[in-house]
Image: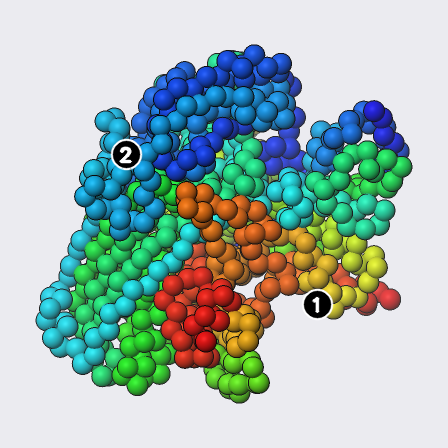
Amino acid sequence: MFKEVGKNIPRVDGYALVKGNPVFTDDIDFKALLFIKFLRSPYPHALIKSIDTKEAENMDGVVLVLSHENTPRVPHTTAGQGYPEPSPYDSVMFDRKIRFVGDRVACVAADSPEIASDATKKIDVDYEILPPVFDPAEALKNGAPIIHNEDDSRGILDPKHNLVGEVEVSVGNLDKGFREADVILENRYEVHYAQHTPIEPHIVITYLDENGRLVIRSSTQVPFHVRRICANVLGIPIQRIRVVKPRIGGGFGTKQEVYLDYIAGYVTIKTGRPAKIELTRREEFISRTRHPISTVLKVGAKRDGTLTALDMSILSNTGAYGSHATTVMYNTGSKVLPLYRCPNVRFKGKVVYTNLPVAGAYRGYGATQGYFATESMLDEIAEKIEMNPIDLRKKIHIKEGETSPIFEALGEGKKGVSQVISSCKLPQCIEEGFKLIEWKKKPKEEGKIKRGYGCAIMMQGSGIPAVDMGAALIKMNEDGSFNLLVGATDLGTGSDTILAQIAAEALRVPTESIIVYSSDTDFTPFDVGAYASSTTYISGGAVLKTAKKVLEEIILVGGEMLNENEENLKAEDAKIISKKTGRSVTYQEIAYNSLYERDQHQIIGSMSHISSKSPPPFAAHFVEILINRETGKIKVEKYVACVDCGTVINPQLAEGQVEGSIINGISYALTEEFIFDKNGKMMNGSFQDYKIFTSMDIPDLKVVLIPSHEPSGPFGAKSVGEVSINGPCPAIANAIYDAVGIRIRKTPFTPEKILKLIK
Amino acid sequence: MQIEVKINRVLKRFETSPGEILLDLLRREGYKSVKRGCETGECGACSIILDGKLAKSCLLFAPQVSGHNIITLESLANSGELQPVQQAFLDEGAVQCGFCTPGMILAAKVLLDRTPHPSEEEIKEAISGNLCRCTGYVKIIRAIKKVGETLNKNV
């Protein structure tokens, strides 16, 4: 029986947050702070022939102007990934070449943001305009403009064809699979650009501490990668940098990007003054985005639903730089295809540069793109073989005890790791969701309103297997409380609370006895950071190991105090108890004893954790929609999500992850859209013009967590943060087909598009 | 120029300029619960209560509020004890990253002051000008509802 795990413990940072305490990056005042503003490119593709910054530099209050002429040129990737990063080193602080509308040309550091902004307008730039390319298929052709023709970039597969990377893997025999099929379908599915829109835009403040070390206070998901990448770009030793992540106002992947921190850092190093970069909302929209992906999917199936062949071919658009380019592409296969039992599978992918905004990590990370194709296609197959789409899914999804050759064939940017599914409650998720949605129980038509039902199943991973590492440190205090220090990064998910619960459970104390401090490169042990749905599973694994180690020490001291051997002792309610005599010592007594009385030492432990597997969380989503045939408007009436995330450490926080990702996903499917002009300029960079869901737009949303036990996870837990963003696009597309008989294979499903197709 | 404004029940005098945005003034004067999310009145993170009504401080010039009455989240729970609406946000898991939370709580407070037992539709409407990307609003709505229901019991 768990005492702390499985409980709705309020967030450990919740008190400060509901009070509005100053806990975010920008909530501390710095004396003599410099404000940094960017001059951004008005052209999608150009060379800077000359740049004259004199007038800007001479303005009152302007302290520094930076451009390619006076900054170090160190090729790097802005993707905050583990070292060596699988993304190409195709970025520099400021370049002579600019590659999309909004690319940074120069920046001004000044005494006020207004002066800095004004000064950027005084920078005189002479551009040589180059022809742009916006369509990824065009970008691959001979003679297309070459976006990265610089000679110092590394890791680009074929720069001359704008090809960042490609992949092709096969298992089984595809031809044989298609020969065995009774039906074969082939279609193209496309998903669009989107932005994460954390309510707090990217922000970083840098300053020098009393010893002249550079402190980077950053709204980041990856403090340790920030430190490493900044050290490289700035040419200073890692030991000269401290990165601190305060509370951050949402990330969703966009803050897994390291591309502002070193600029603020450089300004601070050059001037000795604190410096701040805070993106405007308009800038945030073109900071990092979701990779738009076009998928051609060909599927062979037997009349009974058995899949005989799956052939998936994707073309991914990474925009002007290749941040997360290859890994997102790999994930579109590796996080999607293993869900389906099929002996003959091929996955082909290409990811290319275009002169459009830069893509990056976005919750779902390729899987969202892939599931739109596979889960739409399954409904199309089901119709063809006259099978209920839910029965089809039940038949073909991977089950407990099974494996998929894709796990080994495809990883993240490289080969994967084979694994057997040791926990999967997807059958129960489908069963429960089907019941709760009341599938097709309501009438199909009410006047001009048409009703439709759709479903989708999905999975994700829990960390990157054999890559992601987290570490934790626990030390004991006199009163029997514990400091838990983790490199893991709470970006609003509640991971600090989850990790505290795991520590408390293992140490046999209440969660309030755990004092969490996270994400400070000077004080906390290493952790790769918050991405790839890794924190509960990987960092949680580290916390559990550490707590067990510390508990061993506690038992050792307690045993000496009780004069008992450890096999006769147990830990319960912050006490070490003799199983023989019932005598006990409290943790407080043990701590005092160890610190002041006998064999004096600090009870402390630190452990690291990586996993050779990445157990997927699973989910089944069901949706009921209403379509107005006259306006084309879709109303999501009801949405049911049943999720297997292993043992649920904190139900409320886990539900919150699912609810947030579903509303984000529905909003992406229905209203969010990048509108570009003919120069590839994003035209709708405001919440007025780029519609994310408000409280008025949400459906009746039901989330049911269906626990399983994942043997490799801390107390049986798996991840929960990303999986559910994969459902809305295909589930709603399937519901649209059910309602009006129109198959939409391109997101988003805007009223204009629906209306055009109905008419 | 100087303005005089009552903030959180205390009369304050500030040096400002005709063009200064109220959001900037409040933040530089230490009211850090007032957040900057868009500066164009669309996200609601900078919400304050102005003369009893929810207002977006990024859409106001500082001199416009001279002689008026402002409440920010700092005024709630000044004794350390949380107000019911804050406690409900905490208990119901209505907080994830917490960045929209100050504006949300103030929006809820304005609603609850006027309508102690709001319906779900009234709650949705009241917070419709405050964007949240983390929670999907579900638990925020539930938290506000719970405050209404608890008050109901007390009555």
Residue A412, percent from left and from top: 28, 48
Mark seen at residue B121: 1
Residue at position x 64%, y 33% in the image:
A27
Viewer-proximal residue among A670 and A442: A670
Q: Regarding mark 1 in the picture, which secondary structure is present there?
A: helix
Mark 2, other Cα within 10 Å: few <14 / some 14–19 / many ≥20 = many
Estimate the x, y position of residue A596 in percent, counting from the top left.
Answer: 56, 27
Q: CA distance from mark 1 to mark 2?
A: 52 Å
Q: Is residue B66 left or right of residue A675?
A: right
Residue under the point 37% across and 79% down? A390
Circle 2: element type? loop
Classify A82 as above or below A55. Answer: below
- Residue A246's quadrant in the figure? top right
Q: Amino acid at mark 1?
A: Glu
- From the viewer's perspective, is A192 left or right of A210? left
Q: Nearer the viewer, residue A206 or A143?
A: A143
* Chain at tag 1: B
Q: Which residue appears at 83% of the width and 38% of the height? A: B65
Observer able to see residue A741: yes
Q: Amino acid at mark 2?
A: His
Residue where numbered disc 2 is placed: A148
Q: Residue at x 54, y 17 (%)?
A: A56
Instruction: Please give the chain letter of the residue carrying mark 2.
Output: A
